[in-house]
Image (spheres, helix red, strand yellow):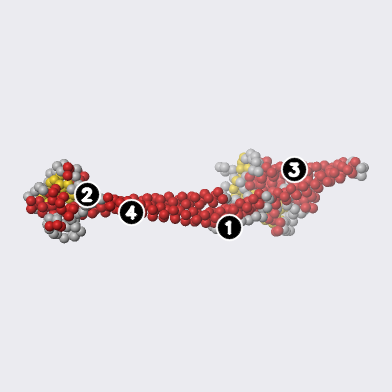
Amino acid sequence: MRSLTWKIMLAFALVVLLALGTVGWMARRAAVAQLGAYSTSGARLRAERLAPSLAEYYAQTGGWAGLQDALNTAIPMMGAGMGRGRGAMGPAWLPMGIMGTSYRVIVADAGDVVVADTGAQDAIGRRLKPEERSAGVPIEWNGQRIGTVLVLFEATEIEQQLASQFRQALDRSLLVSVIVAGLAAIALGFLLARQILAPLRHLRQAAVRVAAGDFSQRVQVASHDEVGDLAHTFNTMAEALGRQEELRRQFIADVSHELRTPLAIIQAHLEAFLDDVYPLTKENIANVLDEVMLLGRLTEDLRQLALAEAGQLSLQREPVDLAAFTASILAGLAPQAQERGIALQADVPEGLSPVYADPQRLSQIFHNLLSNALRHTPAGGRIEIRARPAPQAGYIAIQVADTGSGIPPEELPHIFERFYRGDRSERRAYGGTGLGLAIVKHLIEAHGGQISVQSRPGEGTTFTFTLPAAPGS
């Protein structure tokens, strides 16, 4: 966790420093460029003000002869005034204060041949370069171009020192700003990291306790961002794990209880046979066999339920005609129903689409539901299978309804749970394992359907489930 704190701090500081460094570099570059542009614009302005004076010189002298000496003499004598004057302040044609020792003046005639250059006397006679000509200011007299003047800024040693000092001061200011901002970024990053990681630390501590088996742990959801979503997901997971652990313990207790009862009966009978308490008659042996068969059904139901919950049930699906299928199922149960005085009926309309199901699993579904109905329906009652197109397109709705004792409302939410004890004595009397409805629910869901139940005590119970219709039907 400490490592993540440092990563967040350093990442935050790095982003801020990169941003400030980029802005500082661009600001320094812009400042230096602006300083250079100021000098260049100043040179251009001086050239524009000098051009009329040079034209006046040309008119007075009839040409450019002597201009080099005139410029060399006049420029060092220039003062700071901006008016015109003569004598010690320079010739009358040259504006006072227009020049200074930091500027180099180049004058070329109409043919672009240099006639004066205050910076390089040996350059007289060369031709102006194209870029020099475009940067220069034309000298005109009576509407004709008689030459070009170009003023270049050449800093003196003092001016160069001042410019260097300016750049150094600018660099120092930028460096101090970056350092101060970097320290502030690290401090803010530390505070931000603590704020982000505090709920993660609580989450980690809760996860450790959950891993140790304490599923009651919850973390506070203090925000609606990703960390809040993570905390909410953790609480949901812990709650689900707690329910699964409770179900696991309940399942182990239920299995132990269901196995213990028949095993105890078998053990008691065998010990009675050995001690000659019970005679070894067919009737007594049949009682032991009943408990063995109950154990066999229980273990088979557990196997089926484990496969269903793991999603490993193999389904061999094919179109199944419900009319013929339900008739066959009811024919197999007819002897039991007649013995108990219960009527069996089927209501499957002609032309109903076949369902797409595994016939063996479908038979298991019907047998479990009908066996329950037979156990809870008194003599003179009725059990009916009904089938109709479901409201959901592509599905068939099937009902198994009885006129039996019904199910109390408080038990309805639990009847599909494993080993739910609605009436243990009755279940033991009829040899039930308490897994039939749980298996039915998983088998139907494996086919892509759903099951529900409606019941009123004393009036009967109706189980309704859906199965997909056969493709193309």
Q: Is residue 473 left or right of residue 347?
A: left
Density class for disc 3 (Cα within 10 Å; few <14, some 14-19, many ≥20) is some
Q: Is residue 254 left or right of residue 215?
A: right
| Residue assigned mark 4 | 166
| Residue assigned mark 1 | 221
Identify the disc placed on residue 152: 2
Mark 1 / mark 2, whichever is N-terminal: 2
Amino acid under disc 3 = Thr
Mark 3 / mark 4, whichever is N-terminal: 4
Instruction: Tell me the residue at 63%/52% (across/down).
Output: 205
Instruction: Tell me the residue at 63%/50% (across/down).
Output: 450
Q: Nearer the viewer, mark 2 or mark 3?
A: 2
Q: Nearer the viewer, mark 3 or mark 4?
A: 4
Identify the disc placed on residue 327: none
Density class for disc 1 (Cα within 10 Å; few <14, some 14-19, many ≥20) is some
Density class for disc 4 (Cα within 10 Å; few <14, some 14-19, many ≥20) is some
Mark 2 / mark 4, whichever is N-terminal: 2
Amino acid under disc 2 = Leu
Q: Nearer the viewer, residue 71 or 298?
A: 71
Amino acid under disc 4 = Phe
Q: Nearer the viewer, mark 2 or mark 4?
A: 4
| Residue assigned mark 3 | 299
Amino acid under disc 1 = Val
